[in-house]
Amino acid sequence: MNSNQISLIKSTWGEVISSGDSVGQSFYTILFEKDPGLKKYFTTDPIEQARKFTSMITFFAFKLDNLEYVISEARELGRRHKFYKTPESAYKTVQNALIAALAENLRDKWDAETEQAWNQLYLTLQSAMLEGALV
Ligand code: HEM
């Protein structure tokens, strides 16, 4: 990821999380609309789970200047996800849901460059998570 993408991630994430749980709630609503079959893997209260997800993204987004650290934490996250027994194909659905939730919450601040930066971040996290799941 280049420095322009990193600052776009930080500024847009800062913007959406300043409105509280909205982006996390949008994310899970969209995720389960796209694939209702994923619901069965989640046992945690949805509000709590949305907070865990958004906190993790906050951690990754604001630590991006230290990409190695982000990647090693994403590997650990991926290792834990092995136990949630979700199919690998769900990564794409999660990506699409995250992008759609961001677009919905950022409204006129959402553009092609921002979308590219978020896709880039997601793919970086995904490959580290899948690597971690192999261990
Ligand atoms: C960037 C991608 C992702 C992030 C940041 C993320 C974040 C998290 C976090 C923070 C947790 C809480 C537990 C923990 O820390 O281990 C969690 C749990 C979970 N995640 Fe993810 N996740 C991602 C991708 C996925 C994908 C692709 C799936 C597939 C559907 C998934 C399904 C789950 C499930 C089933 C749980 C357990 C929920 C429960 O205990 O009820 N996650 N995720």
Image: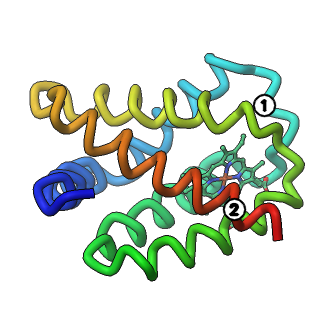
**Which of the labelled discs sits on residue 88, or is there none?**
none
Ligand 1 image position (quadrant): bottom right
Residue type highlighted by circle 2? Glu
Rounded to the nearest angstrom, the CA distance separating label 2 from label 1 is 22 Å
Q: Position of residue 87 (x, y in %)?
A: 82, 37
Q: Position of residue 20 (x, y in %)?
A: 34, 53
Q: Position of residue 108 (x, y in %)?
A: 10, 26
Residue ID at (51%, 35%): 95
The residue carrying mark 1 has its beta carbon less than 8 Å from ligand 1: yes
| 21 left or right of 27 in image | left
| Quadrant hosting residue 128 | bottom right
**Residue under the point 82% across and 71% down:** 135
What residue sits 44% from the left and 60% below the top? Answer: 57
Quarter placement of the N terminus? bottom left
Image position, residue 60 (x, y; %):
41, 68
- Which amino acid, by three-letter code, is at mark 1? Leu
Kind of element beneath mark 1: helix
What residue is shown with label 1?
Answer: 38
* Mark 2 residue CB less than 8 A from any atom of ligand 1: no
For the residue pair 40 and 117, the one nearer the viewer reads as 117
The first of marks 2 and 1 along the sequence is 1
Question: To which residue does mark 2 refer?
Answer: 131
Towards the viewer: 91 or 30: 91
